Image (cartoon, rainbow, N blue to C red):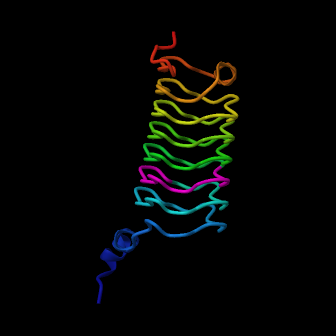
Amino acid sequence: MLHPSTLRYLPQLFKWLLNLSHLDFSETNLAGSNFEGDDLLSTNLCASNLSRTNFTGADLTGADLERVLFDHTKFKAARLLGAKMGGANLQASDLTAADLIRADLTSADLTGTDLTGANLTGADLTGADLTGANLTGANLTGANISNAQLAEVSSLEGTVLPDGTMHK
């Protein structure tokens, strides 16, 4: 029998035992879930509802996140290397210090999103809506993004632009 004081550790134990990588959660409603620190490598979440979900510190490398509803979602320090996020709705989400190297964000809605310190090296932002997004200190080296898109963001202070120059 478990001592009552150990019960508080059960959720962390179950998350440690459960590997969420390479699973198919496409077209599911997981709104409000907590995936903080979880490994979701190459997981398929395509066309799912993940509004107001916590992915802080999670690893979503190679995940299929196309057409996902992510509004008001936390991705602080999350790893999204090569993630497919085309057409995703990330309105008002927090991607502070997120690693989005080579992520596909084509036609994604990043309206009002906080990308402070995010690494978007080589990311494809073709057709993405960045109106009011905060890119302070972000790295856009080699990213596919237009000057018109950059003109719509709220801040580029300290941002490394696609050509490798620092925005002043």
Q: Quadrant of the N terminus?
A: bottom left
Instruction: Give coordinates of residue 138: x percent, y percent.
Output: 48, 27
Classify residue 23 as left or right of residue 108: left
Name the dominant secondary structure of the magenta segment: loop
- The reply to whether the magenta stretch includes residue 85 is no
Instruction: Give coordinates of residue 154: x percent, y percent.
Output: 64, 23
Residue 39 placement: quadrant? bottom left
Up/down of 67 relative to 109, above or below: below
- The reply to whether the magenta stretch includes residue 65 is yes
Up/down of 93 relative to 131, above or below: below
Instruction: Give coordinates of residue 153: x percent, y percent.
Output: 65, 24
Residue at position x 62%, y 58% in the image = 50
Residue at position x 45%, y 60% in the image = 40
Q: Which residues are magenta?
A: 55-70
Q: Foreground residue, 5 or 40?
A: 40
Residue at position x 57%, y 34% in the image = 114
Classify residue 18 as left or right of residue 129: left
Residue at position x 60%, y 43% in the image = 93
Number of labels in the image equals: 0
Residue 92 placement: quadrant? top right
- Residue furthest to the bottom in view is 1
Residue 24 placement: quadrant? bottom right
Classify residue 168 as left or right of residue 15: right
Q: Foreground residue, 149 or 57?
A: 149
Instruction: Give coordinates of residue 82: x percent, y percent.
Output: 48, 46
Up/down of 28 relative to 110, above or below: below
